[in-house]
Amino acid sequence: MKISTEYTISNRRAVNYNKRPSFKRNWAEHASWGAKYIKETGKADFKLFTFPDAKKVFVEIGKKAENKFGNLWEKIVKIMAIQGAAFSIDQVIAENDDTSIHELENKGDGIFETRDIPAEENSQYRFVIITNDNQVNLVKDPYSKQQPNIKGWSEIYNPDNYEWKNTDWLEGKDTRRIIRKPEESLRGLENLIIEEINIPTLSEEGTFNKAKAHIDKIAERGIATAIELLPVENTFSKQWGYDGVDKFAVNTNLGTAAELKDLIDYAHGKGLNVIMDMVPNHMGTDGDFLSKTGPYENGSGDFGSLFNYEGIHNRYVRDFMANAALWWANEFKVDGLRLDMTKLCDSDYLLKQIVAEVNEHNPKIFLIAEDGKDNREKITQYNKFEMTHDNELAMIDQGVDNIAYRRFNSDPGEIGFDTEWDFNLMHAIKEPLSDPNFFNLDAIDSAIWNSKYRTKFALSHDEIGNYDGTRLAAKAMVSELDLFSKVKGTEVGEKGQNAGKLAQWLVEKILSGELDEMSMEELHRQAKEIGLKDNEHLAPKKIKTAFETSKAKQKLCLGTIMTIPGPKMYFQGDDVMDLSTFKFFRELSDEKEKRAINDPDTLKLYKQKGYDTLESVARPQSMLGRIKPKDTAFMQESYDYIKDLTDLVKKTPALQKGEIKGTIKDYIHKVHAHILSDGNEEYMVVKNFGQRFHSKEYGVSNFPDGEWIEIFNGDDKKYGGSGYINSDRDTNISKNNQNLNLAPNSLLILKKV
């Protein structure tokens, strides 16, 4: 609402954008933003970055912790102004006496602050901003660390809410902890095998507390050395996590901050490193008040509002996100941070600042980028110039000022993440999975040569949830049965979605045993309801054969990423070939109203994904373990495969941190091999992406010198293979005596003797 006044403002305060207050970036400064609760005194300090030309800023605090004010606009303040030489506010009065209002002092440059305000833990508060044009903005705290309602008042957070148990881990005494070592080539990350997990889909309750049961399973299986939590930034509902609007607050639908700390502590006790996923590239669309709070945002992108990292008044916006990284690292004792789609930040200076701040204040924490810009070398390269932390930040500030105020483009140079997601490798190994006519070994070869320092993965939550919700094996089924050409649809996206749905339906019918009991008529009747064209037919025998091939392809993809030196990652359940879907899911606070009026944006999202994204629909469909196979033998076989392979990796330095010594490309048979060395030991990983069985006949002209023995074969019957192994030969394998057994879609490892 507008302030009611009987005068005109004759003189607006001029703002000198080049004159900066003498704020430092020490730890006290980083920790000073928002509401800082002091338990010993029962008081709190408040600090806000808002519009540099704001006239007044107040904080309104609920006197009693049990007050629940809900929506920010439910209690409207009354502003009474009196005429003065320029403009002054005589008093700010609440409608009721259950709150107190305190004015913040203008420190310049948009910083407003007040100290020693009587407050209680969990008391609710909001900021009242009087803008330069007399607008009254009632906003939550952008630094809110406890936000039960995304459109409501913030709550005063008491950081003294948990006593950490696994102190040996925190002190670096537990040898299972992976600690950043910048002086080493892989920076200490060669032991990193990550399971990417989504808290809401690990249990029916979808909470931090209930996620412990899955942590137990991960620890018992002994494959992963780390877990990566999809974002838990606060949103309206349980969801997959990338629509956060409270960048410092835990999603209250999943549990409390103390319960998240307990989960992380629990994982540490099980020997698992914990990586926190955070989203610096956009705000969610639901509950975003930043544009009313200050110059935090700069336009909109595909997923929500973008941040003002390189526009006017950018410094404290960059500090805002750097402080979010420090908050998750320091407050929640995570071992690593993963930054979502960093290229969409449109600011390498912001990325460099986050790296600089985390390295300074939490130097043991490792940093992972999901950059997605064709593996830019600068993302994981360090600045080779020696400079102090303050000077590095000053250089960043100056570089951004050149862009924002002088329109002079500049580049921060090397950024220095410890690793980044390897999209090039993911796309390269996905091609033989999805294309029966695959022949592009060059892409695989190039990606392997360049993947050592990057985090390797076959599919992440994105490639699953954004593309029909299906896992690796179901995607391979589309290719094996040529479903894309057999399903209805007028657009490429629609046909792809229908093909994915049909493949998943077939997978579930096989696993449940229902396919064996269905008549041909019933099979095709139901398949056509899913999307099969009226004139197309599917043979049950061919469906089963395609499924067996698809399982082998999934194992080959996972085996490939596990045998390349450096960090590795898989999605929850892939270690036991859980073929349950994983879909994009969320519910917005106005979802029901939007759906009632057939909102175009809601319909667009449904069409884009090919399924209903409502949390109550898509989350149950995305539950880990939703599919209960009649015969679980293949899940055990898949686990044995990954377990034996990762056990071999963990005790073999060449597979952890070795160098690629050479590669072999057999275009005719679609076979690729990479040769690894570490000191005096050499290993060769052979991957058959082709569909031909080679019975004691396979060989290549450029086979390396020396004698070799087989130490792992993914086609072993133990792993559900056909038994084409080479470990029972009378003679060693050599250039002149190869004669290898090599099954389709198989992986074998040879060691030089």
Image: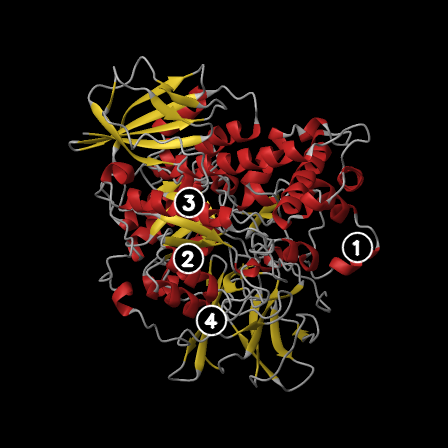
Q: In whole angstroms, how far apart are the C-alphas of marks 4 and 3? A: 25 Å
State the SS at label 2.
helix
* Front one among 376 and 73: 376
Name the amino acid, label 2. Answer: Ile
Bin the neighbour count of mark 3 within 10 Å (Cα to Cα): few under 14, some 14-19, many 20 and up: many
State the SS at label 3.
strand
> Which residue position holds label 2?
218
Say which quadrant the N terminus sits in.
Answer: bottom right
Name the amino acid, label 4. Answer: Glu
Where's residue 684, x and y in %? 29, 28
Label located before the other in sequence (4 or 3): 4
Q: Is residue 740 above or below residue 9?
A: above
Label located before the other in sequence (2 or 3): 2
Q: Is residue 323 above or below residue 56?
A: above
Bin the neighbour count of mark 2 within 10 Å (Cα to Cα): few under 14, some 14-19, many 20 and up: many
Image colouring = secondary structure
Q: In whole angstroms, how far apart are the C-alphas of marks 1 and 4? A: 34 Å
In this rendering, position of residue 109 left or right of residue 286: left
State the SS at label 1.
helix
Name the disc covering residue 595, or none: 1
Q: In whole angstroms, how far apart are the C-alphas of marks 2 and 3? A: 13 Å
> Which residue position holds label 3?
569
